[in-house]
Image (cartoon, rainbow, N blue to C red):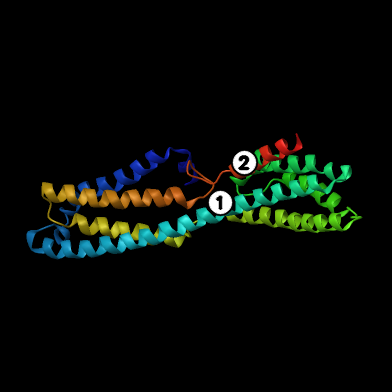
Amino acid sequence: MNWLYWLPEPLMLLASVTTVVLLIVFLPRLLGRVPLLAPNAVNSDFVLRLQNTLFTMTGLVLTFTLVQADNNFRRADAAVSAEATQIDQLDRLLSRYGDPEVTAIRPQLHRYAQSIVTDEWPDMLRQHGNPATARAFTPISRRILAISPNTTRESLIFAEMLKSLDAIAESRGLRLNTFSLGLPAAYWEVVLFAIAMLVFVGATIEQTPFRVVVLAAQTAVVGAFVGFVFIMDQPYRGQTSVSPDAIVKVIANMHARAG
């Protein structure tokens, strides 16, 4: 289903709403041919009360899934922001150290940050990291570990460098792990089952023009929620997605600092 994320989000919402509305409008015509399920005035009152209960339960399920999807999105966005902050912090420490050999590490850090945006980000959409980005970090780590502080000031800065270095490695691993964030299949199974039951029960109500309009409006709300949850389910896909903008801004700050 990942190909759907290439579609415009309004189109995905419209498709979700249209699907459930068409079902609630045309399904009663099919069920009317089944003797046991044919709508009638006697059963409609009971079905209406049951349908209201099902709508409330379905709304609660969709609300829960939307909250979970939003939490996953925020976790992914926080991971990218944390990684950008750590890269920026390390660049500042390298510039403050005062040794030309240490300052010479900064271009390598710039290339590593740029590799995240240009090389690794597209590969993340295929659910794996980029080997070139991993290799770009190795010489940075080696050169920083080879630094020998001579003064108390240098020792303090070096200690902060080591912390930032470890934090960057940890943040990259966390970012790669957040790509797998998403609602488990069980969530979607429950949601789709609840919607199917809601539409099925609504289709057994005796149809009048007024009831058709009201039921269509009710199911349209459900369809909009489903489409919205689907859009938020994959943090790195679609128009509303986590982007590398935080790292891009850090790269710009690093170039400005170098100038």
Q: Which residue is drawn at 65% across and 40% down?
A: 117
Label 2 sits on a secondary structure element that is: helix
Answer with left or right where residue 238 lies relative to residue 64. Answer: right
Q: Earlier in the sequence, mark 1 or mark 2?
A: 1
Work out which quarter of the rendered image holds the C terminus and state it.
Answer: top right
* Residue 77, disc: 1
Q: Mark 2 points at which residue?
A: 122
Answer with left or right where residue 224 lies relative to residue 139. Answer: left
Decide which of 69, 88 is in the foreground and name it. Answer: 88
Answer with left or right where residue 170 lies relative to residue 221. Answer: right
Q: Give the image quarter of residue 254.
A: top right
Q: What residue type is labelled 1?
A: Asp
Question: In the rendered image, is residue 97 in sight?
Answer: yes
Q: Is residue 186 above or below residue 15?
A: below
Residue 85: x and y in percent read: 66, 50
Separation of residues labelled 1 and 2 (CA atoms): 16 Å
Q: Which amino acid does label 2 sit on?
A: Pro
Query: Which residue, as the protein is rendered here, is positioned at the far top?
Result: 259
Residue 212: x and y in percent read: 16, 48
Answer few, some or many: residues within 10 Å of disc 2's Cα (few below 14, many 20 plus, some between 14 and 19): some
Residue 54: x and y in percent read: 26, 63
Q: Which residue is drawn at 41% across and 52% down?
A: 229
Q: Residue at x 70, y 39 (%)?
A: 114
Residue 152: x and y in percent read: 87, 58
Q: Which residue is drawn at 30% across and 53% down?
A: 222
Answer few, some or many: residues within 10 Å of disc 1's Cα (few below 14, many 20 plus, some between 14 and 19): many
Query: Which residue, as the protein is rendered here, is positioned at the far left?
Result: 41
- Please tell me whether mark 1 or mark 2 is closer to you in this view: 1
